[in-house]
Each structure stands twice: as structure tokens, then as C-alpha cells.
Image (cartoon, rainbow, N blue to C red):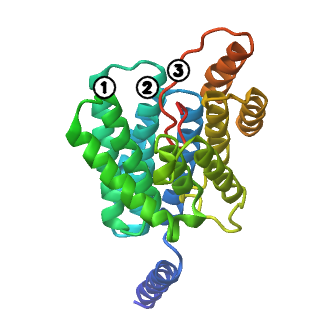
Amino acid sequence: MRNVIRVLVFIAYIVALAAGFLLFAEPPSKTDDRAKVSGIVEKILKADYGDDRPGLTRLHGELAPYAAQTGDKMFASRVRYWRGFALWRRVLNGFNDKAPKEEQEKDIAGCVAEFDEALALDPGFTDARVGKTSCLISLWSLDRQNQENRDTAMKHLTALREESKAAGAGNPRVLLMVAASAWYAPPERGGGQAKAIEMYGEALIVARRKPEKADPLDPTWGEPEVLSNLAWANLNKDTPDLDAAEANAKAALAIVPYWHYARDILMQNIRNAREGKPRATPPAPTPAASSS
């Protein structure tokens, strides 16, 4: 009987230890999930720069299990953002790859839905608004005659411009979006080529201020994208500045040497301009785009 009691006491001791460990130790699944998502985010960024559109589709799917974890709204909103980002970059790279219109429309619908989910979880998530606005502009770009798509895109862009005057002033991705839109606005409305280039310069200064303690799931990209937009602007302005365009493109490639757009399209267009050869006109300078 005493042996039975000893066994029962021992089992109770083990159970108590296990309960205490579970009570006070941080659940490993939460930490593991963040690490796994961070790894997928790195792959998404690499796939974007590398024009790996099939890879972006696959990585969008790999994030699906984590998007359902709505118990941690901040975590879930970031997962939704990066799912939207993957489809957004499929669209932007798709313009350069001449992807079918139907495929582009499907990806745009997907990325808008993901960014909407991110905003529902975190209404103050400005970067999700940047992505959604760019996707809506891309949708209008597919059919310039669609007045409804144009009005929707402009409504979101106007709201983002207003936001950039306040909280967005320290976000280079907001400034990038606003600068790109200024390129096509007349000077009397605060736009024009010179104004856009000036704003790109401001965005670059902000992009180079790296946050000291950034959450790996928060967007921090921007510097190479601003540089590529600056290169595009200097190449395509009324009086091209090819030296500045080349310097900006090379600076972007110094950060991301394998960037397909900057290396294979932008630099080639700059070389063609120097040699007096015709160059393919890339899509409008969409903020932070591989296809800017």
C-alpha cells in the first residue's frame, strides 16, 4: 500500500511540475509562428525582386494557416498584409511580364481583399492602405476607360495624401505613393515632374532612417524602391538627366543586386537612351514597384 501511495505522490508531483511549466512558460507555438512567418516574408521580398511570380503565389498560400490566428490581431493583420503584398507584387511584376488581363484582375482582387482584412484587424495600419491604393490604381491601369475604377482609386489616393500630411510623414512608403501620383498632377495642383522628384528625395531621406527596434513583421522596405523611382523619373522627365538616372539605379542595385526590374529593364533603358535607341516605356511609376 505504501508503494502505491508513493507512486501516486510522485505522479502528482510530475503533474504539478508540468502544470507550472505550462502556466509560466511562453507558449512556444506563438514564438515559432512569428519566426516561420518572418522567414516566409524574407522569401516574398526576394521573390518580388527576382520577378518570381509563381513563387509569390506559393508563398501567399504558405501564409494561409497563420492568417486564421485572429486571437492576436496585430500578428494576424501583418500576416494578411504580407499575403496582400505577395499578390500586389505579382501584379506589378506582371505588368512587365505582360501577364494576361484576367490574371492581373484576379490578383488585384485578392490583394485588395487581404489588405482590407489587415485594416479590419488594425484600422491604423497605414501600410495596408498604401498597398490597397496601389492595387486599385493598377486595376484602373488595366482599363483606363473605366470611370468607376478611376474614381475609386482617386478616392483612396486622396485620402492617403491627407494622411501623409500627418502620421504618414515618417513613412517612406506613403511618401513614395504620394510622390508617384504627383508626377502626373499639374503644377497648379501641387504636382509636376520637378515636385515629384523633390518628393522622392524627401522619401529617400526618410527611408534611410532605419528603425532601431523594428518588428520583423512590420514593413520596412522602401530605400531601393525610392531609388528606382528616382531613376525612372530622371530618365523620363522632359529633359532627361541620364547621369542621375544611372546613379540612382546603381544605388538601388547596390542594395538589391539581383533586382530584375532595376538590373534588366531600368538599366537597359538608360543605356538605350544614351545610345539614342528607342526604349520600352515601362508602366507608370507605381510606388515601391518592381515594375515602377
> Residue 49: where, in percent of width, then height?
59, 33
Q: Looking at the rendering, in which quadrant would you find the C terminus?
A: top right
- Number of the label disc, if any, that sits on residue 160: none
Q: Indicate whether 164 appears above or below 235.
A: below
Inspect the image, locate mark 2, and give the three-letter code of the amino acid beneath it.
Answer: Gly
Cα separation between marks 3 and 2:
15 Å
- In-front residue for pair 193/28: 193
Instruction: Answer whether labels 2 and 1 touch (C-beta < 8 Å).
Output: yes
Left or right: 247, with 152 as reference point: right
Q: Residue at x 68, y 50 (%)?
A: 201
To which residue does mark 3 refer?
281
To which residue does mark 2 refer?
94
Left or right: 78, with 261 as reference point: left
Q: Residue at x 52, y 24 (%)?
A: 282
> Residue 32: where, in percent of width, then height?
53, 59
- Mark 1 or 3, closer to the camera: 3
Cα separation between marks 1 and 3:
22 Å
